[in-house]
Image (tube, coloured by chain):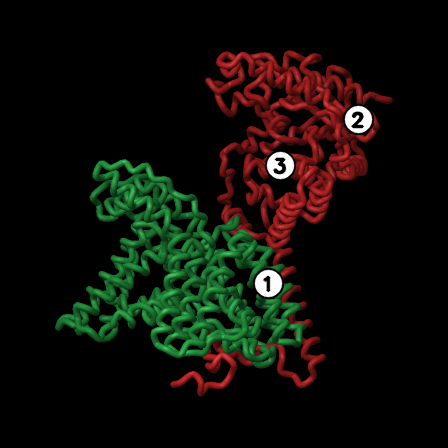
Chain colours: A green, B red
Amino acid sequence: MLFTEGRFFLLFAAAFGLYWSLQSNRLRKLWLLLCSCVFYGAWDWRFLGLMFVSITLDYGIGRGLEAVKTDRGRRTWLTISVVANLGILGFFKYFGFFVDSAVALLQSIGLDVGARTLNVVLPVGISFYTFQSMSYTIDVYRRHMRAVRSYTDFALFVAFFPQLVAGPIVRAVDFLPQLDRVRTWRDDVQVRAALGLFLMGFVKKACVADGIAAAIDPVYVAPLAWDAASHWLALALYTIQVYCDFSGYSDMAIATAGLLGYQLTKNFDWPLLATDITDWWRRWHISLSTWFRDYLYYPLGGNRLGTVRTYVNLWIVFFLCGLWHGAQWKYVIWGVMCGTYLITHRLWSQSELGSRPSGRARALIGWVLTTFGVMMWWPVFRGLDFTRSGQQIEILFGWSPGGQRNLGAWWYAGLAAMLLVHMGTRARLGGAGLARLPDWAWALGYGVCAALAAAFTASGYQPFVYFQF
Amino acid sequence: MRVEDQPGSHGMPAKAGIDFPRMSGSSVSGSPARGSTFARGAALVLLGFGAFQATAAALRAITPWPEDYGLRPKRDWFVERKDQFDILFVGSSRMFRGIDPRIVDAELARAGVAGEHGPLRSFNFGVGGMLRFESAYVLDELLAEKPARLRVVVMEGEAWDPTTDFLKNTWSSRSVFWHDWERTRLALHSVALVDLSPTERLERSWLHLQLCGMKLFNMGQGARIVTNLLGESRDPFQRSLTHEQIAVAAGYQPYEDFMAPGPTTWEAMLTNDPGHGIEIQDRVRGGNERAPDLAHYNVTALEGQKARVHAAGATFVVLLNPGDQGAPEERALAERGDVEHLLDYNRPDLYPGYWAPKARIDDFHLSRTSAEELSKAVAAELARILRPGG
C-alpha cells in the first residue's frame, strides 16, 4: 500500500476519523496498531508474523536488560538482540546474495558446488524496522532510556504505519515518550503545515519522481542507444528523481504522523544544495546516517583513535551502509565509493589547499564538485548490471560513441526549473505570504493545488524506490 | 543524565522531531467553543473539497479522449460529421477490420433502402481493443451528440465481462476514460454476477473503483492535457488513421493496409499447423453448443444500452463476427427477446468460408476479401431490418 494509492487514503481516513473520536489513549494506540497491521499486511500478511517476531524479541530483551543488574548479563542480552536482529535481516535479505556470491567464487576457481539457493522473499521495509527495533535495545543497554513496559507501545513504535516501510528511522527515545499522553488536536496538530507537507511530498513522489522515471528508465535499459548528452542529463535527472522519491515519501510520512499528533524526525535538509560530500551526508537520509553514526561509527571509535583509524571507520560504515541498501555488489561498490569520497574530502579539507578559495566561490566550486561526485555514483547505483553501468560510463566520457537517441531539450529546462524550485523552497520564498493567508483562502488554494497535483501524476502507480532497501 | 531522573513512563521527554513551520491560524482549532471549532473545520474541509472538485471538473472538461489506436481521431472526425450518418458500427478491431461501410452503403442502395435524405450512409467506429464497457461508454458519448439521421446502431456481440484485464493496459488512459459513474456501476454489477472467489471479486471491484477515482480526479491526465493544448497529441501505438484515411473508407481499414501479409498470417499459420483452423472451428462450435449461462450476463447493462439507442430513435442490432470463441449467450438473449436483432455469422457450419485459409489474417481478424463478404451479408440483413415491417 503506497501513500499515493487510493486505498491508503481510505485507510487513513478511517484511522484518522476513529483515532480522534476515541478519548482513551490506550484505545487510540490499539487502533493505530491495528491500522498499522492492515497497512503492512496489505503487501503480504505473512510479513506481519516476522515483524511481530522482531517486536516480541526486542520487547523481551528490553525487559531482560532492565531486569539484570550485572554488566555481563546486560552484554549478553544485547548480544542476543544484535545477533537475532541481524540474523533475521541477514537471512531474509542477504542469504541468497551470499550463497550466490560464494557459488560464483567457487565456480570461478573451477569448483562446481551445484548449490541450491532458497527463494527467500524479502519482506517490505525489513531494513528499516530492524534498525529501529535494534536501536531501542542498544539505547536501553546504554541506559539512554528505560525499557518500555507496555507491549502495545513498543509494537506501535516499531509498526507505526507512517514510517514503517521506508522511514524515517525513528529512535525510541524520540517516539515512545509521545505515547505517554493523549495527543490533542489543539496542541499537537498543525493542520496547515501537515497538509501542506503531505501535498508537497505527493507532488515530489507522484509527479516529479515518477515523471522523471518514465523518461530516463529507458536510458538505463539500453545505454548504447543514447547519446552522451542524454546520459549526462539522465544522471542529473536521476539525482532529482531519487531525492524527490525518497524525500517525498518522508514528507508524506511526517505529515501523516503529524495529522495524528506525532512527530517524526526530519530526514532530508535540502541535500541538493550541499557544498561538500560531508555536508551531503548531513542532509541526506539523516535518520539513517545518524543511526550509523551513533550505533556503528562511534562504537568503532569514531575519530578519536587517530587519523588512519578514522578513515578505516568511515570506510567500514559506508561499506555496511551500501550493503544495507541492497543485497547486490553494486550497492557494496556504491558504499565503498561513498566512503572513499568522504575520506578524500577529509584529506583535502585538512590540507593546505583545502582552505582555498573561500566565500561564495568556495561554495559554488564545492557545490559543482559535490553534485558531480554524486552523479558519478549513479551509474553503479542505478545501473541494471555492471555491463550496462560500464557502457554508460564509457559513453559519458566519450570512450564509446553511444547512440543517436536524446532525451529532448525540454528536460534541460525542466532540470533548471526543478533546481530553482529546490532553492526557492530552501529560502522559503513566498512562505510569509502563505502563512498570512486566511484559512478559507488557504483551503480554496489547497483544493485547487491538490486537483492539479492529481492530474499531473505520472500515469500508473510506481513503487517507491526505497522500498527495496 | 540518568534516565531514572526523567519524567514519564518511558524515562525521556518527547524530543521535537520535524520542525513544522508555525503559521498563523495553522490549526482549525483555537476558538473557545469545541462545537464551533468543529463546524469551522468542517466548513473549511468542505470549501477545500469544493475547490478540488471544481478544479477537477474543469480539467476533466479539457481532457482529450485517448489517442491510443486512433480512438480520438475517429471520434473527432465523426462528431464533425455526425448528421451525415444513418448507421453506426461500434466495436473492437474485429469490427474495425471486418465491416466496410462503403460496401454496406452500396448494397443498401442496390436493395432500394434509402432514408429521407437519400442513400443511407454508415460509419465504422471500430477501434482496436475496445471491449464492451468501453464501447458502451463511447456509444453513449456519440449518442449524446444527437446524430440527427441515426437509424441503426450495430454493436459487436460481446459479454459484459469485468474480468477482462484491459488487454494488459490496466492503468492506461483507455482504461481510465470510460470509468464514469454509470459505467463503473455497470462494471461493479457485472463483478457481482460473474463467478469469482470473494478475494478476486473484491480485487476486481476495487480495481474498477480505483479507475473511476482516476477518471474523476483526472489522475495522470495532466501531461495529456498539455500535449493536447500544444497540438502534440499522438497515438503511442501508431495505429491511428488520419482524417483523410477515415474519410476514404468511413472508418474502416482492412488489415492488409495496416500490415502487409507475411509469414504470421492465418494462411501461413495453417500451412505450418493445418490443425489450427480446425481447432478454432471446433472451439467455436463447442462454444455455440454450450448451455448459455445468462446468470452471469449483465442483462441490466444490455437493457440500458438498448433503451438509450431506442431513445435516440435508432434500432439496436448485435453483430456476432466470425470469431474464435462460441457465443451462446447472445443467441439465447435474442431468442428470449432481449436482443431484438442478432446478426450471427459466428457459425462455421453455415459460413465455413470465413475460416478458410485466405479468409483471415489471424484468429480474430478477417482479411480484406472476407470483410467485403461479411459487409455484403450484413448489408442484406440491415436492408431486411430497415424495410417497412422489417
Name the side, left or right, on which A46 lies relative to A168: right
Quadrant in which the N terminus of chain A appears: bottom right
Residue A261 left/right relative to A404: right
Instruction: Have a look at marks 1 and 3 and say if they share a chain.
Output: no
Looking at the picture, how far across and down is residue A274, in whole percent? 31, 68
Secondary element at tag 2: helix
How far is mark 2 from mark 1, CA to CA?
Answer: 51 Å
Whether residue B359 is visible to the viewer of this picture, yes or no, is yes
Chain label for disc 2: B
Disc 1 residue type (three-letter): Cys
**From the viewer's perspective, is the residue at label 2 or at label 1 nearer?**
1
Helix, strand or loop at mark 3: loop
Mark 3 belongs to chain: B
Q: Secondary structure at mark 1?
A: helix
In the depicted structure, whether residue B203 falls above or below residue A425 = above
Amino acid type, mark 2: Ala
- Residue at 65% across, 60% down: B54
The mark nearer the N terminus, 2 or 3, is 3
Q: Residue A250: x percent and y percent?
A: 46, 64
Residue bearing the label numbered 3: B164
Give the Cα distance between marks 2 and 3. 24 Å
Residue B334 image label: 2
Query: Pointer 1: what residue?
Result: A35
Q: Nearer the viewer, residue B19 or A131?
A: A131
At label 3, counting other C-alpha atoms closer than 10 Å, the crowd grade (few under 14, some 14-19, many 20 or more) is few
Q: Can you say whether A89 is above or below A269 in the image?
A: above
Q: Is residue A283 rendered to the left or right of residue B214? A: left
Q: Which residue corresponds to the image point at 47% horizontal and 73% vertical from the top-left?
A: A63
- The residue sitting at the bottom extreme is B5
On what subunit does the disc labeled 1 rest? A
